[in-house]
Amino acid sequence: MRGLQALLIAGFFASCFNAPSVLGQPSKVDSMTYGLYRKGCAAYFKGDVKGAVGWFHQCLDREKKSPSLSKDDFFVLINWLGSGYGAMQKLDSAEQVFRYGVMKDPTVPMTYYNLACTYSERNNLDSCLAFLRATYKYKANWDKHETFPDPMKDDEFKRFLDNKRFVDAVAAMKR
């Protein structure tokens, strides 16, 4: 999931290394969970995707049992863990992680975008478009400090750029 990596790094760098934000979240961030999260971020920034996935996987296991991360940190965890699995071509694991994110909050567009990337990797145009449509449906929820991605310029969708159905569908979503 090459095209998304730069977007993720640019947008979520501060989240990994600043104090956790817990507004609207459980009152206390579990230090073990947050430590695993930070180790995953550090590994990811070093280019150690496999190491990051290991830390993030442990973090998510703890988070599922006892939620303590802020919403922003939780979705960094979901999107980086899933993207890491995608980079390792473990697409079933990536899909499971992203779907868990959708289950926790179905209004977060980045999670749908990552599912669209996952289905693009599988060469599944129908599912890819369905998740891109969900991404655009919740576009207003995209982080205001982030640039909304353009599927027509993202390497993740390169295989579909000559497909009229894909091009027309994305054009319609942009309207």
Image: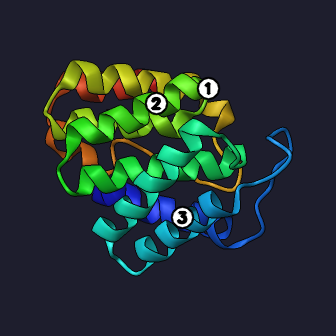
Mark 2 or 3, nearer chain start: 3
Q: Is residue 63 left or right of 53 when viewed as pictured?
A: right
**Front residue of this view, candidates 89 and 145:** 89
Q: How many marks?
A: 3
Residue at 54% across / 47% down in the picture? 62
Q: Residues within 10 Å of mark 1 (few under 14, many from 20)?
A: some
- Amino acid type assigned to the residue bearing label 2 in the image: Tyr
Residue at 20% across / 46% down in the picture? 90
Quadrant into which the N terminus falls: bottom left
Question: Which mark is drawn over residue 122?
Answer: none
Per the image, the residue denoted by label 3 is 36
Farthest bottom residue? 46
Q: Residue 65 placed where, x, y %?
A: 57, 37
> Is residue 143 depicted above or below 46 in this figure?
above
Q: Residue 153 placed where, x, y %?
A: 34, 50
State how far apart marks 1 and 3 are (Cα).
26 Å
Question: Can residue 160 be seen here?
Answer: yes
Q: Secondary structure at mark 3?
A: helix
**Front residue of this view, candidates 99 and 2:** 99
- The reply to whether callout 1 and callout 2 are in contact (CB within 8 Å) is no
State how far apart marks 2 and 3 are (Cα).
19 Å
Per the image, the residue denoted by label 1 is 107
State which mark lies toward you, 1 or 3. Answer: 3
> Is residue 103 depicted above or below 33 in this figure?
above
Based on the displayed image, in which of its 4 quarters is residue 25 positioned? top right
Based on the displayed image, in which of its 4 quarters is residue 53 positioned? bottom left
